[in-house]
Amino acid sequence: MTVNDLLKTIQAKLREQKLTIANNMVDGRMSDFESYMKAVGVAEGIEQSISIIDDIRKNFDTEDE
């Protein structure tokens, strides 16, 4: 497994986690506003992580050229 493959796998797992959070919100599984706000913060952190990994992958791609 290459580094790029590993980063793709991590991104996929992060997207799965973000989707789970979104589904919980849609299904009304947030017990209160505080839980909702925590979930929003976690989802934003996941999105930022995905973006950072994407930037790293792009750097790997340009270095390989």
Image: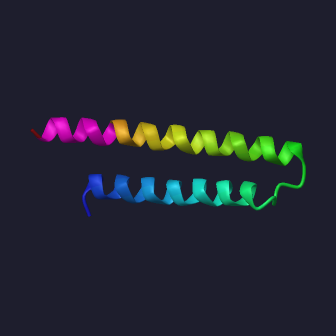
Residue reaching furthest to the front: 26
Q: Is residue 64 above or below residue 30?
A: above
Which residue is at the front of the view, 9 or 30? 30
Please provide percent x and percent y for residue 60.
23, 40
The quarter of the image holding the N terminus is bottom left
Residue reaching furthest to the right: 32
Residue at the image position 50 percent from the left and 41 percent from the top? 49
Q: Which residues are magenta?
A: 56-64
The quarter of the image holding the C terminus is top left
Please provide percent x and percent y for residue 26.
73, 56
Q: Is residue 27 left or right of residue 20?
A: right
Please provide percent x and percent y for residue 44.
61, 39
Residue reaching furthest to the left: 65
Q: Is residue 28 left or right of residue 10?
A: right
Q: Is residue 45 above or below residue 19?
A: above
Please provide percent x and percent y for residue 22.
66, 54
Q: How many marks?
A: 0
Q: Is residue 65 above or below residue 19?
A: above
**What is the image's colouring?**
rainbow
In which quarter of the view is residue 52 placed?
A: top left
Residue at the image position 80 percent from the left and 46 percent from the top? 36
Q: Is-magenta flag for residue 60?
A: yes
Q: Is residue 3 left or right of residue 62?
A: right
Q: Is residue 42 left or right of residue 29?
A: left
Residue at the image position 74 percent from the left and 54 percent from the top? 25
Q: Is-magenta flag for residue 49?
A: no
The rendered magenta stretch, by its main secondary structure, is classed as helix
